[in-house]
Structure formats: C-alpha cells, structure tokens
Image (cartoon, rainbow, N blue to C red):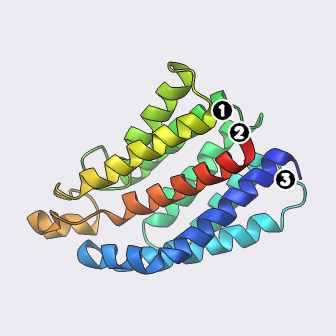
C-alpha cells in the first residue's frame, strides 16, 4: 500500500471511530429536528467503510475514497448515503494523480458541489452545506492565496466548519425533515453539519500526524 493510500485508510478508520464515539450525540441532535437515525446511520456506515478499505490490496487514494463512498452508499440509509457516499465516489476522481495541495482543493470543491446538487441545498438551509461551504472556501484560499501548508490550511478549514456548525443553530431549516418544523427548528444544531465537522477534525488529526 502506498504511503498516501495508507494515510487515507487511516483517515477512514479514524472517522469511523469518531462517529461511533459521537453516535449518541448525533442521535440526540437528530431527535430534535429529524428522524433520530443520523448517529446510527453514520456510525454503522463508516464502520463498514473502514472494514472495506482495510481489505483493499495495495490501493491508491482514489481507490480508498471510492470504496469508502460506495460502501456508504450501500450501508447508510436515508439521504445521508447519497450525500456522503455518492459525493465521495464522484469526487474521488480528483485524486487519480495522488494527493497534492492542488488535487486536495479540487477534491474538496467537487465534493461540495455534488453535495449541494444531490441535496438541492445551499448556504443557510441548515444542512451539512453550512459547514462545508466555509470550510472548502477557506481551504482553497489558504492553499492558493495564503500559501499555507496542507495541515495549516486544513486547520483553518476545520475552524471555518466549526463556525458553520454554530451558524446552523439560530437559523430556520428549509431542507429535509427539519424543514417540516418551520420555526421550531430554530435553536437546534444541525446533525449533518456536526458530523461533517467531526469528519474534518479526524482528517486534520491524521494529516497532522503524518505531515507535521
């Protein structure tokens, strides 16, 4: 397995472990404005993804990401499977030539656009997009304009995602089951944005361990 492929396997494993740890919290968040299944779906789906990528024979990053995405598509119920899994499968093509700052930006931008398209969601709809948009834009600027290292750029992106999660609390949901609550969705943190933040935090931890 290449060093880059091994790093992505480590990242998928770390995400799976984190989402299992946060299962109850995500379930509580989703109980308030959704179906109460986000925590279980994400923990189960990423655990299966971690098992699937661990069985790959000498994979490159594109194969690891595509395998994780396909597993999420098949294992995660509701809207989360296509949003998280399908978007990963599509964006994985950006890593065909390996992981570089440039391909990392391309991957992040493609993933964001596919999530927005699949969920028909935009910034301010109280969804995972509210964490992704500031994170991806910050990551791109940090790499292309501020000339930061990938780890520095990821750290900035995680901080932006955290602000995005906070932003979901006071706004009204306009997509998904939460939108059925109308103004009663105000005051609740979006579970999809929250799980997105957890995923990004684990990516940062793995990148820091390997690159710093």
Please tell me which of labels 1 and 3 falls first in the chain: 3
Residue 105 lies in quadrant: top right
Query: Which residue shows up at 17% across the image and 66% down it?
Result: 185
Residue reaching furthest to the left: 183
Q: Give the CA separation, mark 2 to mark 3.
A: 12 Å
Residue 96 in the image: state x and y as whole percent: 75, 38
Are the residues at dot 1 and dot 3 in contact (C-beta closer than 8 Å)? no
Q: Secondary structure at mark 1?
A: helix
Q: Which mark is residue 95?
A: 2
Whether residue 89 is visible, yes or no, is yes
Residue 54 lies in quadrant: bottom right
Q: Which residue is mark 3?
A: 59
Q: Give the CA separation, mark 1 to mark 3.
A: 17 Å
Residue 110 in the figure: left or right of residue 70: left
Q: Which residue is mark 1?
A: 103
Residue reaching furthest to the top: 145
Residue 41 in the image: state x and y as whole percent: 49, 76
The answer to whether 152 is drawn above or below residue 92 in the figure is: above
The answer to whether 114 is drawn above or below residue 145 in the figure is: below
């Amino acid at each position: 397995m290449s060093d880059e492929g091994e790093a992505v396997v480590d990242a998928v494993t770390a995400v799976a472990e984190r989402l299992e740890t946060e299962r109850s919290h995500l379930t509580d968040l989703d109980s308030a404005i959704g179906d109460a299944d986000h925590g279980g779906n994400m923990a189960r789906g990423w655990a299966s993804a971690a098992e699937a990528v661990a069985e790959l024979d000498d994979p490159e990053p594109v194969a690891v990401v595509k395998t994780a995405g396909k597993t999420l598509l098949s294992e995660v119920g509701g809207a989360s499977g296509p949003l998280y899994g399908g978007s990963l499968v599509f964006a994985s093509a950006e890593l065909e030539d390996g992981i570089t700052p440039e391909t990392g930006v391309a991957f992040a931008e493609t993933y964001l656009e596919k999530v927005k398209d699949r969920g028909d969601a935009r910034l301010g709809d109280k969804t995972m997009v509210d964490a992704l948009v500031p994170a991806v834009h910050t990551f791109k600027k940090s790499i292309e304009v501020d000339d930061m290292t990938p780890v520095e750029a990821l750290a900035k992106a995680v901080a932006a995602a955290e602000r995005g999660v906070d932003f979901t609390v006071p706004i009204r949901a306009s997509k998904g089951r939460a939108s059925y609550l109308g103004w009663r969705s105000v005051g609740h943190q979006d579970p999809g944005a929250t799980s997105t933040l957890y995923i990004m935090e684990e990516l940062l931890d793995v990148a820091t361990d390997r690159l710093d």
